[in-house]
Image (cartoon, rainbow, N blue to C red):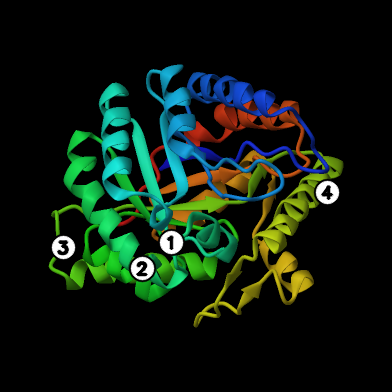
């Protein structure tokens, strides 16, 4: 099982203010640290027109992280494809992939915030068509140059379409394991029913709220940080429709319920607790996990200490976990 770390959003929030230059400088420090610890990848996230400087341009940030590393993969989770000009994005991604020996993971999503579409002068009703056109442009230009192209989806129908096209997917950290299992199964079935395009099952990667600690006080602090990180979703207007395995999660209409659902996905505990949880995720049909530990209020030194422990105590035990063929 591949293990990455994210999501690096380069924010300066009200509770954790910092100069924008500090956020970008620390991104490079983190890239070097993750590579030295043996993590597979680092993942960045994009939004526009938000008060805290949420990173609006992922490819330049990804290129900077790639430039200071030799083996670490750097991914976008997610780049909002309908807001981009496809040919320009494809050329840029191809250049970055070529200059980094193909270490760019390009995750793309539809986007959902009206303010972003309005600010970019794009009608939200056009987003699906623009997403399809963008995917076609990227597959024709960037993927042959080494980019791995991922799709972000939250419904069984959408992930089945990705599977049918042979595209790997990345799943939200707010999804309970039951929904992760349902989505991974739909993705595989879509691939199989389409005749197994490409011959090799496209991968499923999931963000998960995991944190290694043996200290109860730190455990409670982590849950508070997770809760604070999801409060931001109310400002971003995020919601997920109900699925057969999971009730709806709407941060705009029922914040308390949505926060509880999201925080309840957290696994915070000993190395063996995390190894067991990662084994469960693998058994759910997931090929790789991105540790969602770059969260609101968590001090950088605490995150780095946790990642160092994780690299020594957990990574060696989970590298050989594989999804059943």
Residue 40 higher or lower than 287, as above or below? above
Q: Quadrant of the C terminus?
A: bottom left
Q: Which residue is mark 3?
A: 196
Give the residue number, with chain letter if any, for mark 2.
128
Residue appearing at x 50%, y 70% in the figure: 179
Q: Nearer the viewer, mark 4 or mark 1?
A: 1
Please indicate, yes or no, whether residue 264 appears anywhere in the rendered image. Answer: no
Q: Nearer the viewer, residue 133 or 149?
A: 133
Q: Residue 113 sits in which quadrant?
A: bottom right
Give the Cα distance between marks 3 and 2: 24 Å
Vertical order, 316 against 135 (above or below): above
Give yes or no for contact between labels 2 and 1 (Cβ–Cβ under 8 Å): yes
Mark 3 or mark 1, earlier in chain: 1
User: In the orientation shown, which residue stands out farthest toward the front?
Assistant: 121
Q: Residues within 10 Å of mark 3 (few under 14, many from 20)?
A: some
What percent of the width, then of the height, locates residue 303?
A: 69, 32
Q: Which mark is residue 220?
A: 4
Task: Residue 83 in the image: state x and y as whole percent.
Answer: 43, 54
Depth check: give the residue in front, 175 or 131. 131
**Corner quadrant of residue 134:** bottom left
């Amino acid at each position: 099982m591949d293990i990455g770390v994210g999501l690096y959003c380069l924010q300066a929030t009200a509770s954790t203010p910092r100069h924008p230059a500090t956020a970008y400088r620390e991104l490079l420090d983190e890239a070097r640290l993750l590579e030295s610890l043996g993590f597979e990848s680092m993942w960045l996230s994009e939004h526009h027109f938000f008060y805290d400087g949420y990173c609006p341009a992922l490819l330049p940030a990804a290129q900077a992280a790639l430039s200071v590393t030799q083996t670490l993969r750097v991914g976008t989770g997610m780049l909002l494809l309908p807001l981009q000009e496809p040919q320009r994005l494809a050329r840029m991604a191809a250049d970055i992939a070529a200059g980094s020996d193909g270490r760019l993971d390009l995750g793309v999503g539809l986007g959902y915030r009206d303010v972003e579409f309005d600010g970019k002068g794009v009608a939200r009703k056009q987003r699906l068509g623009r997403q399809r056109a963008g995917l076609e442009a990227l597959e024709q230009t960037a993927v042959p140059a080494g980019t791995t192209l991922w799709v972000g989806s939250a419904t069984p129908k959408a992930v089945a379409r990705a599977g049918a096209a042979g595209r790997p997917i990345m799943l939200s950290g707010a999804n309970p394991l039951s929904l992760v299992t349902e989505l991974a199964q739909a993705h595989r079935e879509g691939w199989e029913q389409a005749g197994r395009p490409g011959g090799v099952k496209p991968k499923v990667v999931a963000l998960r709220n995991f944190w290694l600690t043996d200290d109860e006080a730190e455990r409670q602090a982590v849950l508070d940080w997770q809760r604070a990180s999801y409060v931001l979703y109310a400002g971003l207007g995020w919601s997920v429709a109900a699925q057969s395995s999971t009730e709806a999660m709407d941060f705009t209409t029922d914040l308390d319920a949505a926060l509880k659902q999201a925080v309840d996905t957290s696994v915070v505990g000993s190395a063996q607790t995390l190894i067991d949880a990662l084994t469960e995720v693998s058994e759910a049909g997931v090929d790789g996990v991105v540790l969602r530990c770059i969260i609101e209020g968590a001090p950088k030194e605490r995150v780095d200490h946790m990642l160092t422990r994780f690299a020594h105590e957990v990574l060696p035990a989970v590298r050989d976990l594989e999804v059943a063929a």
